[in-house]
Image: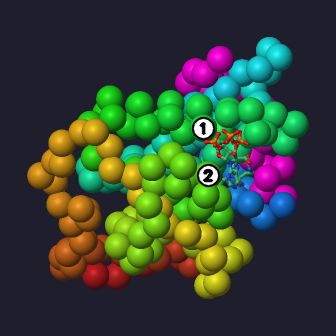
Amino acid sequence: MLRHASINDIPAIGKIINDCAESGLMLHRSMADLYENMRDFHVVIEDHKVVGVCGLKIVWASMAEVYALAVAPEYRGRGLGRQLVLSVIDEAEELGLPKLMTLTYEKEFFARLGFETVDRQSLPLKVWSECVRCPKNQACDEVAMVRTLETPENTVPAEPPRPVQVDVPVQLTVYAGQHRQNVD
Ligand SMILES: CC(C)(COP(=O)(O)OP(=O)(O)OC[C@H]1O[C@@H](n2cnc3c(N)ncnc32)[C@H](O)[C@@H]1OP(=O)(O)O)[C@@H](O)C(=O)NCCC(=O)NCCS
């Protein structure tokens, strides 16, 4: 059975993801991170327990990311990973997202689901926000893949606007031991 994750699923989701992280297949995720992002996750239930998970993270109006895809080792090869990704694709289409991307070592698996390899530099900058906490940051060997969804392209630019520098007069309060002084 496939469904959205609920709070009680998080310990099992954490175990599946972090067991894969131990093998270097994906990023480790803290329990706080998992609870905070719980609404991203789809789970598959077999034998009355969570045996697989996949996340859908919205990056920008033009794209969402499929992430944290993992099936417990003893349940692999039964089509559950495929079902999880298809479930995430359905949700992305319902939300009106035109494209899905993933960063993966499982190129063949995602190719069978309609994802195509793209130049990593073509992805929105925001995608790389998690890379800073990845041990492979400077030597990333994941493949970037994108699947176009059956939703019309929207008109929002592919990238968020860059922040502009604005000069704001600041009153900085400096605390030094018991002394306090204001600096303009
Ligand atoms: C990748 C993973 C989620 C696949 O889950 P799964 O349930 O075993 O996959 P499925 O049984 O749904 O396989 C779907 C199809 O992909 C193929 N496939 C699955 N894993 C594959 C692999 N490693 N290489 C090539 N093809 C693969 C299957 O043969 C099947 O082919 P079909 O379309 O002809 O039937 C699972 O192996 C896993 O959890 N791996 C560890 C974590 C990981 O690497 N996650 C990906 C990070 S992005």
Residue at horizontal 44 percent and vertical 37 percent from the top: 89
Residue 70 magenta-highlighted: no
Amino acid marked by disc 2:
Phe
Write down the region rendered in magenta.
1-22
Q: Is mark 1 within 8 Å of ligand 1?
A: yes
Mark 2, secondary structure of its residue = helix
* Residue 81 percent location from the top left of the image: 65, 39
* Residue 176, visible in the rendered structure: yes
Q: Earlier in the sequence, mark 2 or mark 1?
A: 1
Residue at horizontal 64 percent and vertical 46 percent from the top: 69
Look at mark 1 in the image and give the residue it sits on.
Answer: 82
Q: On the rendered structure, is 173 left or right of 34?
A: left
108 and 45: which is toward the camera: 108
Q: Residues within 10 Å of mark 1 (few under 14, many from 20)?
A: some
Look at mark 2 in the image and give the residue it sits on.
Answer: 109
* Residue 178, visible in the rendered structure: no
Tell me: residue 42, above or below residue 141: above
Q: Cβ–Cβ below 8 Å for labels 2 and 1?
A: yes
71 and 160: which is toward the camera: 71
Tell me: residue 141, above or below residue 20: below
Q: Residues within 10 Å of mark 2 (few under 14, many from 20)?
A: few
- The image quadrant where one finds the N terminus is top right
Q: Is mark 2 within 8 Å of ligand 1?
A: yes
**Residue most toward the top?**
48
Q: On the rendered structure, is 5 left or right of 122?
A: right
Indicate the colouring scheme. Answer: rainbow
Residue 15 magenta-highlighted: yes
* Residue 19 percent location from the top left of the image: 84, 49
Q: On the rendered structure, is 151 left or right of 91?
A: left
